[in-house]
Amino acid sequence: MEGSDMVEFKNNDKSCDIHTWGEFCEIIKGNGVQKADFVEEGFGCIHYGQIYTHYGPYTYSTNKFVSKATFDKARKASKGDVIMTDTSENVEDICKSVAYLGEDDIAVSNHALILKHNQNPKFLSYSTLTDCFLAQKRKVVVGVKVSGIKPEQLAKFKIYLPSLTEQKRIVEQLDTFTSSIENLKEQIAQRRKQYEYYRDQLLDLEGKPGVEMKKLGEIVVFRNGKGHEKIIIPDGKYIVVNSKFISSDGSVKKYCNEQISPLYVDDILMVMSDVPNGKAIAKCYLVERNNLYTLNQRIGAFHVCDSNVITKYLFYVINRNEQLLQYDNKIDQTNLKKDDILNITIPLPPLQEQQRIVSILDTFEASIRNLEQQLAQREKQYEYYRNILLSFE
């Protein structure tokens, strides 16, 4: 969607008004559905935890089911109802909502609220994403580690509620954004699959002519990070490289003013500890600047010391390497040991072939980054215009 299209994003309905949610909603607490109740086939259900992780602003179906006995005891959501969480470990996720647009009634778990109403369900769900809705949540949520909200508190929240005709027009505009965003996410997912396929094909080199097999410890110098927890500050001179930094590809940062464990250009960094089935274990990051980073504990640093190895090639080989992922038993915390890491086998083709592989994989990475930048820009546009359309302050 180009900037010229944005002239449509204005409120031209003079009959709009400010209301409280309690004026038009019956708010019912969900009950009875636990994760242990899930079955392969049965009656549709939404568990509050899925609203955080699986659902967007609306859905036509569920991906979890319960037996008839569980369904009969549970409170139900019908077509058009909005289902909303009432608890979370952070304020942002409280009242995270999904408008249910399916035909059949579904069961709803505890820690979720069912909103029955006579308004546009998608309009209500979109309204919970605005800055003014968040500001109202911040005033009333209670709890330290786990926060919650009561139905009677939600009932007093204010909402900008134009006519149903205007609600429909606004929803159509916001749907255009969400459709564009989902399309970009799908393109990124497909491009990642292509990248992973070609990476695996290109790096399957064992036994091929001219390929030498070496242990990682033979071609790198290893360093371990140090604890920085006591010197973390909101904004500092150095970025503390921890697992969050690496797993987010450098977007989530912590800072300090002491470079306890310096990092240098072409250091390859690896997450050595993660939760069971975690997506960060053995994930790598390649340092591109001197005098910017300091290495936290449980992160390993590798620097190539063999002139027959291209650093970027080695990065692609060891990043989430299957030889290391095997240490994740899906049950316990995974802690990679230095010796286990340095003992993995690395295929080393001639330098020319290493460079060819790097060039191909770099092209894929650049393509993915470009799509991710487009996605970030589109999400910012969506947030901006969503607030313009739905906020009342």
Image (cartoon, rainbow, N blue to C red):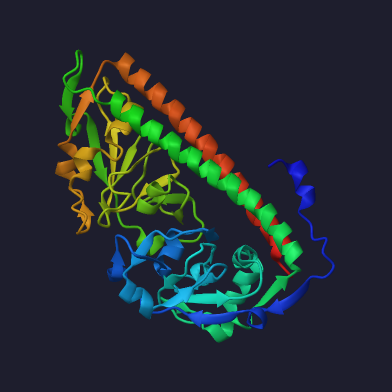
Q: Is residue 104 left or right of residue 23?
A: left
The residue positioned 74% from the left and 76% from the top of the image is 18
Residue closer to the observer: 50 or 225: 50
The residue positioned 62% from the left and 46% from the top of the image is 378
Any part of residue 86 in sight:
no
Q: How many marks?
A: 0
Any part of residue 179 in sight:
yes
The residue positioned 70% from the left and 64% from the top of the image is 390
Q: Residue furthest bottom?
A: 152
Q: Quadrant of residue 213?
A: top left
Quadrant in which the N terminus appears: top right
Image height of 163 relative to 1, above or below: below
Image height of 304 relative to 373, above or below: above
Q: Is residue 171 left or right of residue 212?
A: right
Image height of 292 relative to 309, above or below: below
Q: Position of residue 200 (x, y in %)?
A: 29, 30
Quadrant in which the C terminus appears: bottom right
Image height of 386 relative to 84, above or below: above
Residue closer to the observer: 233 or 326: 326
Q: Position of residue 23 (x, y in %)?
A: 67, 82
The residue positioned 32% from the left and 20% from the top of the image is 354
Q: Position of residue 381 (x, y in %)?
A: 66, 50
Residue closer to the observer: 30 or 137: 30
